[in-house]
Image: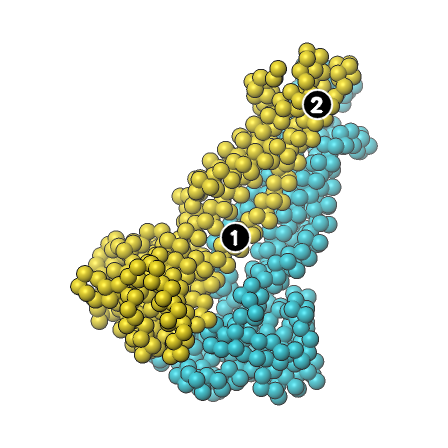
Amino acid sequence: MKIPLSYSYRNLVTRRLTTVLTAGGMGLVVFVFAAVLMLAEGLRQTLVATGSYDNAVVLRASAESEVQSIIERDKAAIIASQPEIALNKEGRPLVAQELIVLFNLRKRGTNMPSNVTIRGVSPISLELRPEVRLAAGRMFRPGSTEVVTGKDTAGRFVGAGLGETLRFAMRDWTVVGVLDAGNTAFSSEIWGDIDQMQQAFRRPIFSSVILRLRAPGDFYNLKARLEADPRLPVQVKREIVFYEDQSKRMADFIRLLGLVLTVIFSLGAVLGAMITMYAAVATRTVEIGTLRALGFSRGNVLTAIMLESLLIGLLGGLAGLGAASLMTFFTISTTNWQTFAEVAFSFTLTPDIAAKSLLFGLGMGLLGGFLPALQAARMNIVESLRAL
Amino acid sequence: MFKLILRNTLRHRLRTTLTILGMAIAILSFGLLRTVVDAWYAGVEGAAADRLVTRNAISLIFRLPLAYLNKIQTIDGIKKVTYGFWFGGVYIDEKNFFPQFAVELPTYLDIYSEFVVDPEQRQVLVKERNACVAGRKLAQRFGWKLGDIITLKGTIFPGDWELVLRAIYDGVEETTDETRFFFHWDYVNETMKKNFPTVANQVGWFISQVEDIERAPLIAAQIDATFANSLAETLTESEKAFQMGFVSMTKAIIMAIQVVSYVVIAIILIVLANTMAMTARERQEEHAVLKTLGFQGRHLVTLIAGESVAIAFLGGLAGIIAIFPAAHFFRTALGNYFRIFNVSDETLAICLLIALVVGVVAAIFPAWRAARVPIAEGLRRIG
């Protein structure tokens, strides 16, 4: 016969303060665990969502980011004439040659400088990225010194808001619109006319060529042909892979640091659970002896104590996860080392992370409760009844 | 009294050991987190006050013409000018990241006197076109010896670059960055002239050494004024401000780490408070007996707080001792991310202080309750 679950549950209720303290400690660990995973996931999702599976990016060979890449005009023209490129409704090829530069802007509030990506784009660029919409104002007029800013840039940087002006490359640029690119890196960029940008920055070259494939499978043909072409020292990547690579180093760093921390922290919390459970067993020696005398087996006692510990772990896991889910309201912005540019992203909670966090809490309860439960199960009936 | 505290501490050996362990782990992680933040600021700490960095005002990815060198040199109060750029090559694999600079080596080594190069090695280094110099720690990391050929794959400057290690520098102080890698700017520039003439004769930054630190801000303004309204306007700031710019870019991460380090204190506070609360509850009867014998509430407070502080102190001490091997692990295993990882004395002091404070705070509630519970009630309690 099993010891009812309510036995374990009521025991926790009786020692409220200790239960809350132990679960609180575990909750904090689960919170850190979940928050770190959410942060890394947020960064990854932001950059992955930025790419689209049907698009390909052409960069100069060995360049790791668009900023490092240089593609001369004649080479860009060769790339733009490939047969795999899809056409739009008007029959024009869906290919955009873009120029990416970094510019130092000062953050609102702190006035500290940070690198913002400025992207010189052509009208096709918007068609290639259906997720980019105009949230306020209007698009820049081709051939003018007007720019539109991503919503994260507009809010964070001095002079980047709608109607304000930015000074760079010896010109004043008026912000005429704000782009909403959802949860993508484009929300952290500034877009302007490619021809104007090339002149202003005196860079008569392109950084990258973005194109839409007729069919996703055409990618392999295109890649093989372009990369084998002796005139073109280029590399071709699927856009989605390109952006995922860009987040890798930073996301790995966050994850690594976070995991090292949570492993260390969880040791502390497991010790806390152990202390609590050992004390719970010690104060209940007589009670456990009675249970055994009544005919409950060693296994029953072991299960009951383990359940108690698991309940604490679950409680901690839920508390930690609850606190962590509040973090989804925050947006963090930092410089991505790989692109050297500012990117804004938010804590993202996925079912996977939620499950991992709860399991993590339960795991801590399991580890913390095992030894004390074993001790309780091993007690000699007569001796434990005599103890007082 | 002291003896009683000690005896009490040793009464529940298992519980005390577990708590001390928990405390040690928390202090260890707090210390490591602080050191991580310190490591972030290492560049700022290593900056010298007499050095000014001039770069393109647009951003670091834009270069400046080499021709600016002559104009900067003529500015009054500048002792010496060097220049170079960030090379950003890949050594075998992206994972092996380390900072690489193509610089005007003779003047660079003069200005950066904290990088000490053996005079004989220096002679060869300066003379040979494709020679390079690496820091001691960097050379150790990859097992490089003098004369080794190091091939870098350029990400900004295309191609494979073969360099010969001709010197290894040592830092003047323990905190000096010994993981940098330098070679001749000329070597890169010659190839650029041949293959990409439009981007030849350009530098990423000029570093000027000023004679008088007091006048540094004025000189910085003067440099920028010289190139105002030109095609490549400059931004000159002290080396410290320049390095600080990098730190502030990743401010969000530093803040997250700091928040986490407070969370760890909260966790340990909870664990210790829990232990003390349990201990005090178990001994309620005993405390009542002590009161009957004439001990006052304050004696009980001392007893409980003393035990709590003793546990916290032991745990803190154990944690601090464990920081050193852990820091060594970080340096060797995570050298990719943390090039400098030195535990400062300040960190150690703060760790110890926190341990003591946590010890006192954890005892407040149980001690307060023990002091207040009436004798009769304390004696009546069972279990």
CA distance for labels 2 and 1:
42 Å
Residue B64, quarter of picture: bottom left
Which sits in the foreground, B378 or B327?
Answer: B327
Which residue corresponds to the image point at 43% horizontal and 77% vertical from the top-left? B63
Q: Work out whether B195 lies above or below A232.
A: below
Image quarter in which the N terminus of chain B is found: top right
Left or right, residue A56 beside residue A303: left
Which residue corresponds to the image point at 62% horizontal and 69% vertical from the top-left? B179
Query: What residue did someone put label 1 on?
Result: A254
Query: What residue did someone put label 2 on?
Result: A377
Which sits in the foreground, B129 or B344?
Answer: B129
Left or right, residue B98 beside residue A379: left
* Element under disc 2: helix
Q: Work out whether A274 lies above or below B293.
A: below
- Answer few, some or many: residues within 10 Å of disc 2's Cα (few below 14, many 20 plus, some between 14 and 19): many
The colour assigned to chain A within the rendered structure: yellow
Amino acid type, mark 2: Ala
